Amino acid sequence: MRAVVSRVTSASVTVDGAVVGEIGAGLLALVGVGRDDDAGRARALAGKIHGLRVFPTEDGARSVGDLGLPVLVVSQFTLLADTRKGRRPSWDAAAPGEVAEPLVSAVVEDLRRRGSTVATGVFGARMLVSSVNEGPMTLLLEV
């Protein structure tokens, strides 16, 4: 699994003109699922997102888990694109929807189990994602 995680001051997802997920200060996590990913990797990714110490405080860097900040999780199969050859990305490494959807849901549920407030997009929908990246701080996570 892969996630592109950004520290944000705000982020939202809109589907068909309606805001379906929105947070203030916290993390935006774009999550991609590969063909070989499983529930264990989903839990590991949730743990990394929850514990990632990217919020500076007077006492050192803290995580969303430490600070009680929200996470916006948006599925994004394009993170598994192979662009090494030619000009057209290959999606062969991305899991099909019936495999990916429950694993993205597992990331969300594990984050909630850990105590995070989680907003989401809509799996498979055409989404408009808006964010204000703070820092900027954007990281690629792989498990």
Image (cartoon, helix red, strand yellow):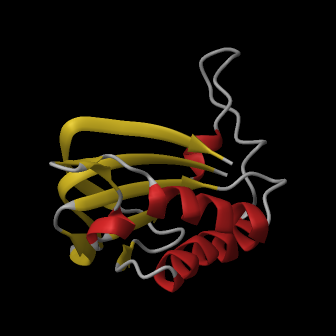
Nearest to the observer: residue 123 or residue 68: 68
The location of residue 80, given as percent across then percent down, is 65, 42
Q: Is 32 rendered above or below residue 104?
A: above
Q: Quadrant of residue 45?
A: bottom right
Residue at the spot 39% in from the left edge and 77% down from the top edge: 116
Nearest to the observer: residue 137 or residue 126: 137
Tell me: 46 left or right of 33: left
Give the total number of marks visible in the rendering: 0
Tell me: 16 left or right of 82: left
Nearest to the observer: residue 63 or residue 42: 63
Residue at the spot 77% in from the left edge and 66% down from the top edge: 40
Residue at the spot 43% in from the left edge and 38% down from the top edge: 139
Residue at the spot 52% in from the left edge and 72% down from the top edge: 123
The location of residue 105, given as percent across then percent down, is 59, 77
Tell me: 58 left or right of 46: left
Q: Quadrant of residue 130?
A: bottom left
Q: Is 71 rendered above or below residue 88?
A: below
The location of residue 5, given as percent across then percent down, is 41, 48
Q: Quadrant of residue 73?
A: bottom left
Tell me: 35 left or right of 78: right
Q: Is 113 rendered above or below residue 143?
A: below
Q: Residue furthest front?
A: 59
Q: Is 97 rendered above or below residue 115?
A: above
The location of residue 110, given as percent across then percent down, is 57, 78
